[in-house]
Amino acid sequence: MKSAEPVDVVIIGGGIVGTVLAKGLAEKVGLSVTLIDAADPQQNNAATDDFNPFTDTRVIALARRTVNELSDIGLNLDDLAKQHNGELPPEIKHIEVSDKGHVGLLNLNSRDYHINAFGQVVSLSALTRLAANASSAYQHIAPAKVTRVNQQSNSVEVLLDNGETLSTKLLVIADGGRSGLAEQVGMTKTSCDYHQTAIVFNVHTQLPHENKAYERFTESGPLAFLPFDSEINGVKASGNGFSVVWTVETDAAKLLMTLTPDEFTQALQQAFGFRQGKVLRVSELASYPLALTKAQSVATHRAVVVGNAAQALHPIAGQGFNLGLRDLSALISVLSSAALEHTKPTAKKQGCANETLLENVADNFDPGAFSITQHYANARKTDRENTVTLTDTLVRTYSNQYFPTVIGRNLSLLALSIMPQAKKAFVKHTTGYGVTLDKDRDNHAAC
């Protein structure tokens, strides 16, 4: 059994969450970091049930705060254009929320809030590759699987399937919650099955998207259209493409997945309407079941969870991924502040910037200390609870046809549309600035 040199932090999970965190902790905090990933970064062919983050076919909407924080870590989304023949990730400048067959309608324009966009739409695999190639400041072990984790008083031992043993002061679980490692280190999780399935695909429409996103509530479930130009059957969209997440009851999803392409397109057109003209092309379909899974605490002895390993949300309103990236910014901030208190005296005398100071973190700094992990847990408490509650409430409010509920949600949409302060509060939260310290708030937004 081989034992590697001890490191400050071991991160399990090499998706976008783990990769961004590894870069941030190594470069901004100056810690020694090892990232372990079960997926093969050299794999190029994606499968519909693929969990390899380098071939993941999903498209995600990054909230404004997420875009800003990725930039602070050194990941500029404009760099994605280099992977796509100069094509920048589409911005979301307009949002339309509607309830099919009812009067509820909400239109949002980013200009009304003095911001350029509510967020941007990116390919998850492209973003992961950008992050993975953006830093060499940490060790990346892949493909490798963790077979066992042993928590000790002053360290954590991580055993890999290749026979190697790693020792670390802090273990970060960022594996999406699929491995059961969080439970192995003593974290309790609750899960609520929504009995719904998300069908994910891309479309080309007759009319250009003009940077507009849609959230449409239908009798079968929420239907989200995000502006994103993809290639379907050899045809590349030119400003008229969307990435779609269609949420339906599981039995209905199974039926939809068996339809012919023409039948599926007809069903989609009926649910979405003709606000973008005709749906011209639909890509291959992928699907996954939906449930609310939440760790009761995000910290235990010398271990923390982040991203979907901490909480997996329903895709309604697109909050889950952005919440997970706020986990990262909080953990980086907590460790950065703690590390500053343990910088070597010689570094402090130099009066350098934080980045330089953190390159001189004292050898006795313990990133897995109880005070630090609990500080992280406390820092995430309010944002997690509020976002989980918001998402779960939206699911239960907008996923049924119970008449009083239908009336209530349409009144809510109408109220939002005519009450500026309510609109501002809604925009603040969905752009990621709903719960944040004053020093982190979006000062450029009129909300």
Image: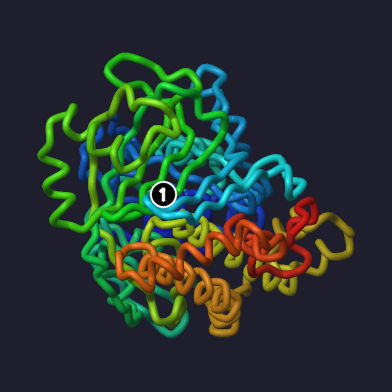
Q: Is residue 203 positioned above or below 355 on the image? A: above
Query: To which residue does mark 1 refer?
Result: 216
Residue 366: horizontal and vertical position, in percent?
58, 75
The image quadrant that residue 151 belongs to is bottom left
The image quadrant that residue 148 belongs to is bottom left
What is the quadrant of the N terminus in the image?
Answer: bottom left
Q: Is residue 186 positioned above or below 97 on the image? A: below
Q: What secondary structure is found at the residue carrying circle 1?
A: strand
Which residue shows up at 88% across the image and 58% down it?
A: 350
Q: Which residue is farthest top?
A: 234
- Residue 171 seen in this snapshot: no
Q: Is residue 419 positioned above or below 89 on the image? A: below
What number of labels is visible?
Answer: 1
Which residue shows up at 68% across the image and 44% down it?
A: 110
- Residue 422 seen in this snapshot: yes
Which residue shows up at 30% across the image and 65% down it?
A: 400
* Residue sitting nearer the eye, 230 or 264: 264
Badge 1 local density, few (<14 within 10 Å), some, or many (20+)?
Answer: many
Which residue shows up at 34% across the image and 32% down it?
A: 202
At label 1, the amino acid type is: Arg
In this rendering, would 71 be left or right of 181? right
Residue 337: horizontal and vertical position, in percent?
71, 70
- State how the image is colored: rainbow
What is the quadrant of the C terminus in the image?
Answer: bottom right
Residue 401: horizontal and vertical position, in percent?
30, 65
